[in-house]
Image (cartoon, grey):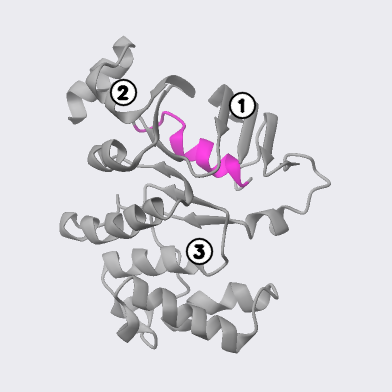
Amino acid sequence: MIDVKGLSKSFGNHLVLDNIDQHISPGEKVVVIGPSGSGKSTFLRCLNLLEQPTAGTITFDGVVITDPRVDIDAIRRQMGMVFQHFNLFPNMTIRRNITLAPVRTGLMKQEEADAEAAKLLERVGLTEKADSYPAQLSGGQKQRIAIVRALAMKPKLMLFDEPTSALDPEMVGEVLDVMKELAREGMTMVVVTHEMGFAREVGSRVIFMDGGKIVEENEPHAFFAGPKEQRTIDFLSKVL
């Protein structure tokens, strides 16, 4: 699904990602963890070119998306992205937030998009919020809507950038439940998160980043039960 080779990213003289290689297969749930400033979110944002890599190539579904001739907007339609702070349009109803992109891009007619929105809202238990505005929703509800909005485009891949870190603790579970259901259905996911329980339960692979590099990666049980690198051991001792 995604092949990353020699990915580096600098902001001025500051090297944030340092020569990363990574392969993500269809159906994998890759969970990226690490301390603040380790490059996790920058790595995620490079995968759909929200951040332009300084060096390296990224191939998505057979297309080298770092080639400047590629229509990145067309590629992004196949990649759902959920941000830390929801990024819903405050002046639009929830239904309109969900249907705008599928209709605007020609993926669906308005009637079809409305039907899809209703189905997705039912799935996350928010049918009654279709005509509400984002300001009328809790943080957990907004984030569930943000996930639904991404799913309305029928993406092949979902990217999550710390989707629960802006939420009150009691709202985290309702968002993680939606993500777990997506994982069970076989969605390919890359998740940057501080939720170690989610990484352990849902991840097919856990990546630990520090200093712009991938320090260690493994399947969850082995990663948490027997980390090999001292930096990983130190990090896990503070967060578990």
Regarding residue 220, the answer to whether it shows in the image is: yes
The answer to whether 135 appears left or right of 13 in the picture is: left
Q: Are marks 3 and 1 in contact (CB under 8 Å)?
A: no
Quadrant assignment, res 87: bottom left
Tag count: 3
The residue that mark 2 highlights is 223
- Indicate left or right for 94 with 66 as reference: left
Query: Which region is colored magenta?
Result: 36-48
Q: Which residue is mark 1?
A: 8
Residue drawn 58% across the image and 89% down it: 111
Residue at left offset 39%, top offset 88%? 131
Mark closest to the chain's N terminus, 3 or 1: 1
Q: Is residue 6 left or right of residue 130?
A: right
- Give the distance between the C-alpha atoms of the residues marked 3 and 1, in whole angstroms: 27 Å
Q: Position of residue 89 (x, y in %)?
A: 48, 74
Q: Main secondary structure of the magenta part?
A: helix
User: What is the three-letter code of the residue carrying label 2?
Assistant: Phe
Secondary structure, mark 2, is helix
Task: Decide which of 166, 185 is in the foreground and name it.
Answer: 185
